[in-house]
Amino acid sequence: MQNHPPTTRVAIDFGASNTDAVAQHSITGETVRRWTLPSVGSPSVQRIHEVLAAAQFDVQAVDWVAVTGGDRSALPPTIGTRPLRQVNEMRAIGAGGLALAGVRDAVVVSAGSGTAVVRASASGAHHITGTGVGGGTLIGLSRLLINSVDPREIDALASRGSSSALNLTIGEVLGGAIGNLPAETTAVNFGRVARHVVDASREDIAAALVNMVAQVIGVIALNAARAEQLSDIVVVGHLMDLPAVRAILALVGEFYGATFRIPEHGGFATATGALLEGAAVDHTN
């Protein structure tokens, strides 16, 4: 194993599809490593060791490990001789989203396999809404419709396709624009297919799928922000790694007069938040 400073701390987020980890120097707060593994089974001591080993960390070389996500209830309070700190996932999402976006009060949207929407501030975070539509939806439907489960391939296909080949627009359904929504805005996802058989390309199907998933997430986020009377909307999670998804979110924001903040390294927001929440224990002791 590579020798790391004993002042390193690690946080692990056990997601439905990905297990994300972040390591920071516990004194400077500098991030020294981010890494991702496919999720396998429930959180366990063995799996924690495997995640650490993937980045050449030995558990005895870290101050402590914070964990969030998944079913953590059976995990012990220590791993080896090091503290194992369990962090509420909503608090981790909120703290990580705020820190990466550099804001103090916001709706934080975690777009992973599904989508969780959290109200976050310096005083904490709590879940306000969400949807089962997320990255898992995009991958699952892509498997069925275009025979691909590779997010990068799906994104590349979508960037070359047109969702209007499968969707009905507001102009087609209502004859023109409605409010701030231009005529070319989606009125019915996959509505054209409901009317008749469409000989669509893989690119067009991918574009329609990305359009549907990103629009659902964007509209839910906007409605949540308005309900909470907040202007800042931070969107994190690995779904935001895909440029085609970000492009649709930007359009949704444009139509509704809002801006989605998509911070760098947003896929690691929950793990980052778990680090911050885990570190707070040191400050209260």
Image: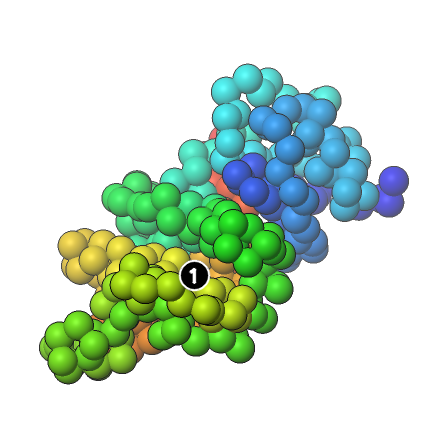
Q: In the image, is 189 to the left or to the right of 35? A: left
Q: Residue, x 68% and y 51% (percent of image)? A: 35
| Residue 273 position (above or below residue 103) | above
Find residue 28 and report its horizontal and vertical position in percent.
63, 55
| Residue 90 position (above or below residue 249) | above
| Residue 255 position (above or below residue 34) | below
Compare residues 237 and 159 and report the one nearer the observer: 159
Extreme residue toward the front, this view: 197
The amino acid pointed to by label 1 is: Leu
- Asked which quadrant contains residue 259, the reply is bottom left
Q: Quadrant of the N terminus?
A: top right
- Asked which quadrant contains residue 80, the reply is top right
Number of callouts = 1
Find residue 212 and report its horizontal and vertical position in percent.
36, 61
Find residue 255 and report its horizontal and vertical position in percent.
24, 76
What element does badge 1 sit on?
helix
Compare residues 228 and 139 and report the one nearer the observer: 139
Q: Residue, x 51% and y 31% (percent of image)? A: 70
Find residue 172 and report its horizontal and vertical position in percent.
21, 77
Q: Is residue 131 visible?
A: yes
Q: Is residue 234 visible?
A: no
| Residue 186 position (above or below residue 96) | below
Compare residues 105 and 183 and report the one nearer the observer: 183
- Asked which quadrant contains residue 40, the reply is top right
Compare residues 220 and 160 and report the one nearer the observer: 160
Q: Residues within 10 Å of mark 1 (few under 14, many from 20)?
A: many
Which residue bears the numbered disc 1? 209
Q: Residue, x 37% and y 54% (percent of image)? A: 109
Q: Residue, x 52% and y 39% (percent of image)? A: 16
